[in-house]
Image: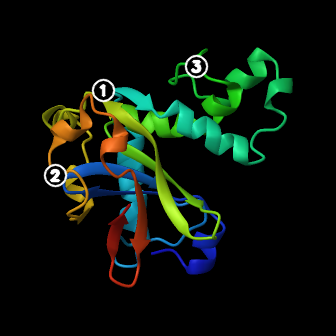
Amino acid sequence: MYPLQYQATHDIDWFATINEHPIHLASNGGHLPFDSYTVSELIAIQHKVANMHSTFGYEIDEEYLRNYLDEGDFYFDIDEMSDEEFRMIIPERIEINRNYSRSLMAYTWSFIDMAMKGFLSFDRIKNENGVDYYHLVAWPKNFDHDKFMRNENSIFSDLHHYDNRKYPHNYRHLNGQNLDRWPYKMMLDLRNNRMLMF
């Protein structure tokens, strides 16, 4: 895996499954599981994901994310941009949702991109006590495991697998349910190479 100093200064996309749910995590300067992938393995997975087709709709928890963005100093100059300038920071493949604020769209677009490929997409943040954890930003709407597996660039078999008794064990939990009914925040237990849900 990457040296710790590199991990601390880079936002690295990494991937895994938890109870067979495909997940994407943006490290945002956090440490990665030390025994999950070599650098070359992770780069190969990142390239495969980049070439996956977008086959799902997506959902986000707008209220939670708006509150999160309001707490920080995010995108303070984004409202000064012209529509053309703003479009330049969002890839053409991502449709700009006019119901979202610019800051919400700027923050979520890369996670939306992952959700449309079938991943539950998480970002790493620190809580008020300075503790690292990952929070869910976007997830695929009406996820279908068979559809994910049929994607010609599907990487399911390449992913490091975790099991966790607190995490949903059935894809039906992801369809049409309020996310407050199941954990969508997690922490890495690097010493024991586990995902901890809360």
Q: Position of residue 129 (x, y in %)?
A: 63, 70
Q: Nearer the viewer, mark 2 or mark 3?
A: 2
Q: Position of residue 3 (x, y in %)?
A: 55, 79
Q: Is residue 26 left or right of residue 10?
A: left
Q: How crowded is the residue under tag 1: few (<14 C-alpha within 10 Å), some, or many (20+)?
A: some
Q: Tell me the residue that label 1 is attached to.
A: 55
- The secondary structure type at the circle numbered 1 is loop
Q: Earlier in the sequence, mark 3 or mark 1?
A: 1
Which residue sits furthest bottom?
191
**On the image, which quarter does residue 35 sit in?**
bottom left
Q: Tell me the residue that label 2 is attached to.
A: 169
Q: Position of residue 26 (x, y in %)?
A: 51, 54
Q: Position of residue 18 (x, y in %)?
A: 25, 58
- The secondary structure type at the circle numbered 2 is loop
Q: Earlier in the sequence, mark 2 or mark 3?
A: 3
55 or 191, nearer to the observer: 191
Q: Tell me the residue that label 3 is attached to.
A: 96
Name the amino acid, label 3. Answer: Ile
